[in-house]
Amino acid sequence: MDIKKDGFATIECIFSITIVCLGIYIVSNVLYNSYEFTLFNKDRFDMLDIAKSKIEETKYIIKNNSESKINDLNKKDKINKFEVETIIEKNKENYQCYKIYVSVYNEKNNLKLESYVFKQ
């Protein structure tokens, strides 16, 4: 009978170690994935901040400059690790209304924002 108890204890230990290893694997996998999502979202937040600031800067320039200077604002820039493209179109339906397109992208992500501004 002593032999059967020792065999049962060995099987019990193997199952216990297996369950603990599976638990550790699941926890480490969840932590790694959340870290990856955090890095992905950080890039998206940085892109959104850049696009918002570019739109506000372009709106300010449109409101305070002549039409010839406004046409020169269509350009591509590089800010940190992102490419930023700004396109301004005059809206033909409304008087002195401009549509602003801002695209921010890198090798992984792409973000496009558009807005309208009225020249006063």
Image: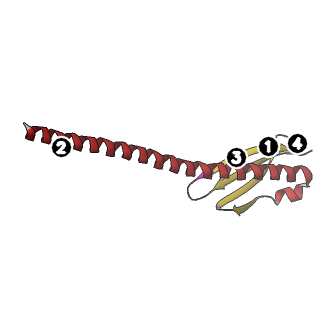
Q: Is residue 74 above or below residue 91?
A: below
Secondary structure state at the residue bearing disc 1? strand
Q: Which mark is residue 95?
A: 4
What's the distance in space between the residues labelled 3 and 2, CA to CA?
63 Å
Within-10-Å neighbours for mark 4: few <14, some 14–19, many 20+ = few
Q: Is residue 79 left or right of residue 98?
A: left
Q: Quadrant of the N terminus?
A: top left
Is the magenta region chiefly helix, strand or loop? loop
Q: Nearer the viewer, mark 3 or mark 2?
A: 2
Which of 36/111 is in front? Answer: 36
Q: Which residues are magenta?
A: 106-110
Tag 1 or tag 2, which sits nearer the N-term?
2
Label 2, label 1: how far apart the Cα atoms are: 73 Å
Contact between marks 4 and 2 (CB within 8 A): the answer is no
Secondary structure beneath dot 3 equals: strand
Give the residue pinned by disc 2. Answer: 10
